[in-house]
Amino acid sequence: MANLLEIENLRTYFEENGSIVRAVDGVDLSVSETEVVGLVGESGSGKTTVANSLLRILPEAGKIVAGRMIFKAINIRELSEKEMQSKIRGTEISMIFQDPQVSLNPLFTVGEQITSVLKLHQHIGRKEARAKAINLFRKVEVSDPESRFRSYPHELSGGMIQRVTIAMAMSCQPSLIIADEPTTALDVTIQNQVLNEFKNLISEIGVSVLWITHDLGVIKRVCDYVNVMYAGTLMEQGAVETVFENPLHPYTHGLLGSNPIQYRPKSKIPTVIGELREIPLQGCKFYPRCPIRNEDCLQETINLREVNENHRIRCIRAEDAEALLRSRNHDLQGAC
Amino acid sequence: MLDIIDVVPVYTAETEGIPWNEAIVEVNHLKKYYTVRKRVIDKILTKKQKYVRAVDDISFVIRKGETFGLVGESGCGKSTLGRCVLRLESLTAGDVKVFGQNIHPLSDKKLKNFRKQAQVVFQNPYSSLPPHKTLGNMLKEVVAYHKTAERDMLKEYCRDLLDRVGLSETLYTRRPRALSGGQRQRAAIARALATEPKFVVLDEPVTALDVSVQAQILNLLVELQKERDLTYLFIAHDLSVIRHVSDTVGVMYLGKLVELAPSKELFEKRLHPYTKLLMSSSPLLSEVYEIDRVELTGEVPSPIDLPAGCRFHTRCPFASSSCRQKEPELIAVNNGHFVSCFLATQ
């Protein structure tokens, strides 16, 4: 499969009160044609900054300081602002945001908003755009699309409005959709519904998706490939089945192990200690929270390395500690 | 079909045979309606006053030392119910007894004592902590007001408290903005414990946190309960969290309890289609409990214009004509297992 998008060593830093925050610090990932790739991490890990860097919609303080983002043989980093707007944003790469009530304009009907996108990017007339929009609404299962077309965002429920933004993202037949926590703000039952519909739609029209979320359950259901992000770098990447069945990085281990459903009620859940706060400048960024660390971890920069085919981790201790981690989790499960 | 052991319309201490000193919270036919502001045109046309029926005739008991898990989607009234139990809201009808005492109304002196006994931890630790106070001052104020420690022991008591919830001593002089989400939630728990309460309402205490931190806070809450013999009302929308902490679970939908049972029983022998729907929405839960997918269409109806008959019939795949006409009552189907569904109780 050809790679549609290839990100190499992306570094995006923010300047805040004179100090530098390394939000994205060396990310390499790729998305192939018709592939759904997950990017998972806790809040503050820099996953949304990756998306914003890709569309070059970073806030003023943020800057891409290194790396290449090759999309269809073009380096996005080198495009001018004008080219970005006419060739990339909306037409080739579109984005779905977490909170649709914020990402849509409250002063215009959803119909006006989607037709303006169509008119701008596809150079079609009002009537044609309207017909197209209603057709799209039908596709994403917006109930009663003709009357919804005239609704304002506040008149729609959370699930409905997220369907509208999905329709909008699909409207110009992009090659890549960046979905930034598209179902997080919804209720569980509605989330389930929208997730299924979106998933079916993706495979139906064959678009590539970069799916950003903090929810491993969602990744497992929709993605082919997963990247686990922590403190601006990728800790583990691989095919979804491989990573979920055989996680090698202690952070992925911890994330997968902290869902309470695996343990007896009221028993102690094995956790990753601490929180994403202090990050060592040298060596492994996960060091302060790692259960299997030793002095070697802080000595030098640790690179992503291939452990199995299509399975990479950024950890030098994983093999030594694998048995240890397993026995620890096993003990805890046995004890509860 | 299941045998109906006894037709008991409500779950009360009396019907359940719970001695008075065992029931920490008793809620009887609680209703909380909010009036909807009339538009000018409605006033002219003298339209009927409309209400949001946030809590609509709910009864249950929380036993001493147990965790009562309350689960439901946003807008189902679970937080309002929690607030009513703490007397943070007035009631429209019904009564709430906490520690055997009717809390609506309550004299000032008794209210102060009630506030000491019953505490709360809110969902969002970013807005529930005073931004201008150091953690130490915040705790000291609570402890001094409720006299949970001697004056000269104040500082030490507060430091111990912080230590107990897993916050280091250096944070004593810090303000909330210097803390991470998990640390803030720990501070909020410390503040709730500062009065040495017997009953704590936990309103979505882990929802705003990251998964790894969520597990840490759950562990802390479970430990504290054992250690201090606390009774919890745990409100959440996440069934896997509810399953982990609860002894008894109530499932809420649009202001009503649709199913109520001991936790293990509820998960293993769920009866109400809404409970099944909630469980099947979580892939991990449906895997563990072998649940078939429940497909549904439609959206949650507005709590102002509730559908006639069973409130869930608009989304229920099994709804029959009787479901559209009559509202089912919460009926006992097994020891301590109640469900309000015609299909499950037929």
Image: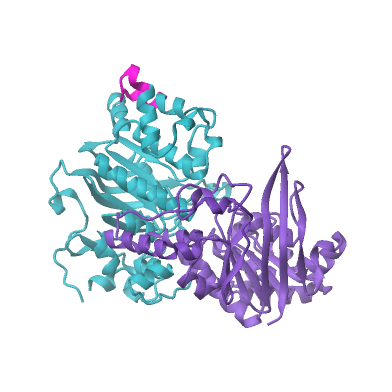
The quadrant of the rendering that contains the N terminus of chain A is bottom right
Depicted B342 relative to depicted A14: above or below = below
Expressed as whole percent of the image width and height from the top left, the position of residue B132 reads 54, 28
Residue B143 appears in the figure: yes
Q: Chain B is drawn in which colour?
A: cyan
Residue B142 within the magenta-colored segment of the rendering? yes
The quarter holding residue A122 reads: bottom right
| Residue at figure coordinates x 51%, y 44% from the top left | B181
Q: Give the range drawn in magenta.
A: B141-154
Q: In this view, does A307 lie above or below A269?
A: below
Is residue B339 at least partly visible in the picture?
Answer: no
State left or right for residue A189 relative to residue A311.
Answer: left
Q: Where is residue B328 in the image (x, y as percent from the top left)?
A: 29, 65
Instruction: Name the image quarter holding the C terminus of chain A.
Output: bottom left
Displayed quadrant of residue A174: bottom right
Residue B295 lies within the magenta run = no
Query: In the displayed structure, does residue B1 sit left or right of residue A31?
Result: left
The answer to which of A213 and A148 lies nearer the viewer is A213
Would you say A211 lies left or right of B14 here? right
> Can you give x and y, in whole percent of width and height, for residue B4 in the image?
16, 68
What is the chief secondary structure element of the magenta stretch? helix
Task: State which chain is coloured purple.
Answer: A
